[in-house]
Image (cartoon, rainbow, N blue to C red):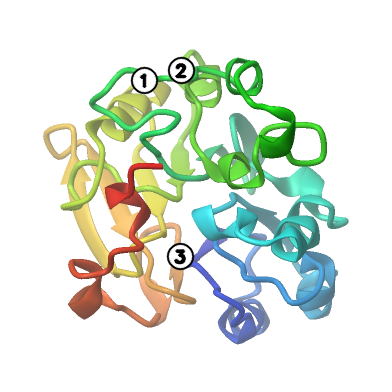
Amino acid sequence: MILFGGDPHGDFRPVLRAVKTYSPQAVVLLGDFDLARSLEEELAAILDKTEVWFIHGNHDADQDCWYDHLFSSQLAHRNLHGRVVKIAGQRVAGLGGVFRAKIWRPPAAPRFPSHHDLLSICGKGERWRGGIPRKHHASIFWQHYTALWNQQADILVTHEAPSCHRYGFKELDELAEALGVKAVFHGHHHEQYTKTISGGKILVHGVAKAGISDQAGNVLIPGKSDTYGRDQRSGLNNQTSD
């Protein structure tokens, strides 16, 4: 069994409790960790009980320490972004981060298809640690999207939502179809729901903040939904221009 965890935002108690209660073979976390210490330290109590996998969210590149606590952690090799991995008998594809107009925000064409393309126009003062600006390590690039296109999977995990969500993207529907998945799990919007895309052929499960669902989409630990405020938040990445 695989469990899927919504954006922790610093609260790891639900995933720790879920592993203790349900003994899953693996847990996949859907981004936005807000880590005060390294990921392996936060999850130390369950690392000998289950496999931990993840994708990153938009906030994981907001601060140097949040970035380092995730991408430089001892679990960094468990990042599913841009690849397909067999987990507990299921082929799981991952696409972390968010669409941004500066890089690529569908339906517009990609402005910078790759990290290399973006770096080519970055001045010295814009670069972070010699590479692209830190925030764009959490942006979706065409190169990562297309890296999945010719692969096959059973489940797709994303931070952004497919088109069944009011702030979703049909490009994720198309990716799910190309992969041949039966289900998509996503975070980002802090909403717990189940809908379908592709004429009902693919299930989409939104997982609320710090919530836990099983691979059938059943809610094991309810999360914290902020649907009341998402329409009004100026900080929602789907509506930003940079």
Q: Residues within 10 Å of mark 1 (few under 14, many from 20)?
A: some
Dot 3: element: strand
Q: Residue at x 78, y 63 (%)?
A: 69
User: Local crowd at mark 3 within 10 Å, few (<14), some, or many (≥20)?
Assistant: some
- Calculate the distance from the C-alpha at mark 1 to the C-alpha at mark 3: 24 Å
Viewer-proximal residue among 176 and 181 = 176
Label number found at residue 214:
3
Tell me the residue at 43%/74% (across/down). Answer: 209
x, y percentage for residue 102?
42, 33
The residue type indicated by label 1 comes to: Ala
User: Residue 206: image x %, image y %?
Assistant: 32, 60
How far apart are the two marked residues, 1 and 2, measured between alpha carbons? Answer: 6 Å
Q: Earlier in the sequence, mark 1 or mark 2?
A: 2
Query: Residue at label 1?
Result: 178
Type of amino acid at the residue the image marks with label 2: Trp
* Residue 72 x/y as whole percent: 84, 52
The residue pinned by badge 2 equals 149
Q: Is residue 127 above or below residue 108?
A: below
Q: Is residue 30 visible?
A: no
* Residue 182 drawn above or below residue 30: above
